[in-house]
Image: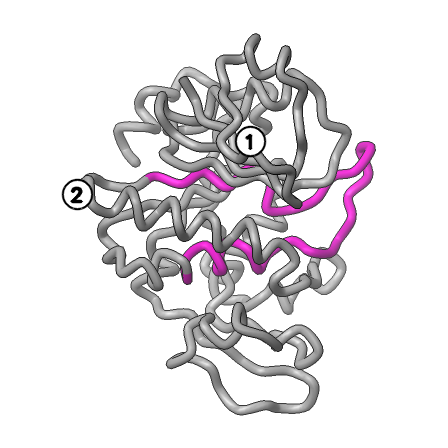
Amino acid sequence: MKLAQKEHEELPDFKEVKGSLGERFADRLRKHPKENISTLFGRNWEAVEEFGRLVAKLKGAGKLIVINEIGAGLDEEGRIIKHNASYEPFELLNEMRKARVKPDGFILNVIDIRKDVLLAVRSTKVLRVPIIEAVGKHFDEFFPESQGEMKGKYIRVSIPEEYTGRINCFELDVMKTPAPIKADITFSFIQMKYSDDYVERLAACTKSGGRIITHVEYEQKVLDKVGLVRSNPERLKYAIYGVK
């Protein structure tokens, strides 16, 4: 990542978020309740599993796999909505585990305009998944060896340090500043007013030959303009685009 930072050191809006000592160890920002975020586990499980299938294909190349998750927090019409924000980075980590990609074989860059969201991702060591959400195959396969017993209305899942250590958090707006490094897979499910410019920025965050997973269907003329190809012919709950 030092190389990536050097390449963009002239960009003033680029900032890696590590947090102070207190912030890093304040699990899920308990010291900052007004800034805390609740989440919904498995809200995009189909797209997450598709991510896992793409990762499995990349594994055979023997190269470092780079993932950019754009927008761990949500922004709708300029208003911050404090929910559904921080589970998915860990769900993506789990897909790397399921694909048997060693921790030193990938990097997950979590990119957002909100520092509080990034600090939540950075500081989280244990997820508290509500029982009502902890159902089905997707949860059963979520770090099963790290799942604790049910306590109250939650099941605690301790995320292995070797996986959380592969997360880098970057505070930036991709509409203004390039991602620190282009990804093999870009994952973006933020709720906002999408535009043609946004998918162009996602493409700019992704390597040639890479994939973008998102939930917005763009018209073919937009994809042609940006240099993307539709990778899923059938209309699903999510969209996959390949970067030319």
User: Which amino acid, mark 2?
Assistant: Gly
- Residue 62 numbered mark, or none: 2
Tell me where the magenta segment starts and ends, as one range. 66-94
Note whether 48 is above or below 178 in the view shown. below
The residue furthest front is 234
205 left or right, relative to 188: left
81 left or right, relative to 66: right
Kindly report the distance in space between the C-alpha atoms of the residues bearing marks 2 and 1: 30 Å
- Between circles 2 and 1, the one closer to the viewer is 2
> In x, y percent, where is residue 192?
75, 34
> In x, y percent, where is residue 42?
61, 62
- Residue 73 numbered mark, or none: none
User: Which amino acid, mark 1?
Assistant: Leu
> In x, y percent, where is residue 132?
71, 78
Residue, x 46% and y 82% (percent of image)? 147
Note whether 228 is above or below 51 in the view shown. above
The residue furthest left is 62
Q: Name the residue under label 1.
A: 172
